[in-house]
Image (cartoon, rainbow, N blue to C red):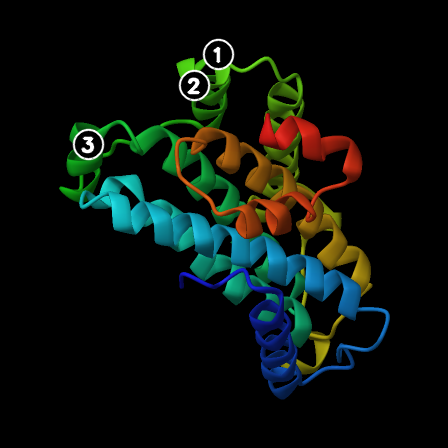
Amino acid sequence: MANIFKSEILEKDLGDFIYSLNQQTISNHSIDSSSKPLIKKFHRNAYIIALLLNKLEKRHIDEHRFLFLSEVLSDLLSNIKLSIIGFKQSSLIITRRILENFYNHIYYFEHPVEYKLLNLGRNEYTPILELKSYLEAHPLFKTISDRNIKIFNDQVFQHYQELCRIVHTKGRNFMGLAKNLEDIRPGYILNDHIESINNTILVMVYLLFKFHRDLEFSNIEKSLISKTFPISLRGHLLS
């Protein structure tokens, strides 16, 4: 994975990624020219998380420092497949898991005892609001003069709250109401759906990059990571 961010490798992997998704398509949500830029953004976000995960696995032997991020990557791959097939609600439930495990990664990174209790089956659930507050108050973030951290943390949490309405079926608009298999059809605009996920994953990547700024990145890696973001954010990301 040393050369994972060479442009030619990234482009080849994107081609393989889109081909694989098209092979899975069983609905009218095939990947056309209008979808490809959004799929490319999704792919790059997933690639950055894979890069962060690879570096963490090389640096740490304790799984509490990387396992939740590994699950984030796994859920991202499941998510895009569900989206293409046409299962919007399932995709949104997976998106909620991604956001939960993002916060879990930040929290359990420095809480090995709590992680052991979690794996012993103890009811160690911590409300997401507390994990959001933990991120905001974390010394690593407090030492950074970057107002985007609070803005993006709020954005992730707001999206999480919206997704909870679907998980807990808070009203008719959040129900599937299928009475037979034929009722399960893609009833949404794929591009809007993927763009919404991309927006949240992008700010999540920003926060992860800031949290793990002690990791070493090559100039090529830094360049390609920064180019994932709008120009207005690139300077803040690398500062």
In front of the other: label 2 or label 3?
A: 2
Q: Which sits in the foreground, 7 or 202? A: 7
Q: Quadrant of the N terminus?
A: bottom left
Where disc 1 sits, the SS reads: loop
Question: Disc 2 designates what residue?
Answer: 140
195 in relation to 231, above or below: below
Instruction: Identify the residue under disc 1.
Output: 143
Which of disc 3 and disc 2 is earlier in sequence?
3
Question: Mark 3 vs mark 1: which is more N-terminal?
Answer: 3
Q: Amino acid at mark 1?
A: Thr
Q: Residue 137's spot in the image, x, y percent?
A: 46, 13
Q: Nearer the viewer, mark 3 or mark 1?
A: 1
Amino acid type at circle 2 is Leu
Residue 209 left/right relative to 18: left
Label 3 vs label 1: CA separation? 23 Å
Q: Residue 44 location, x and y as percent?
A: 62, 58
Q: Quadrant of residue 159?
A: top right
Q: Quadrant of the C terminus?
A: top right
The residue at 64%/78% (across/down) is 15
Task: Please provide percent x and percent y for residue 99.
Answer: 52, 42
Mark 3 and 1 residues: CB-CB less than 8 Å, in contact? Answer: no
Q: Badge 2: how crowded within 10 Å, few (<14), some, or many (20+)? A: few
Mark 3 = which residue?
112
- Is 15 situated above or below 112? below
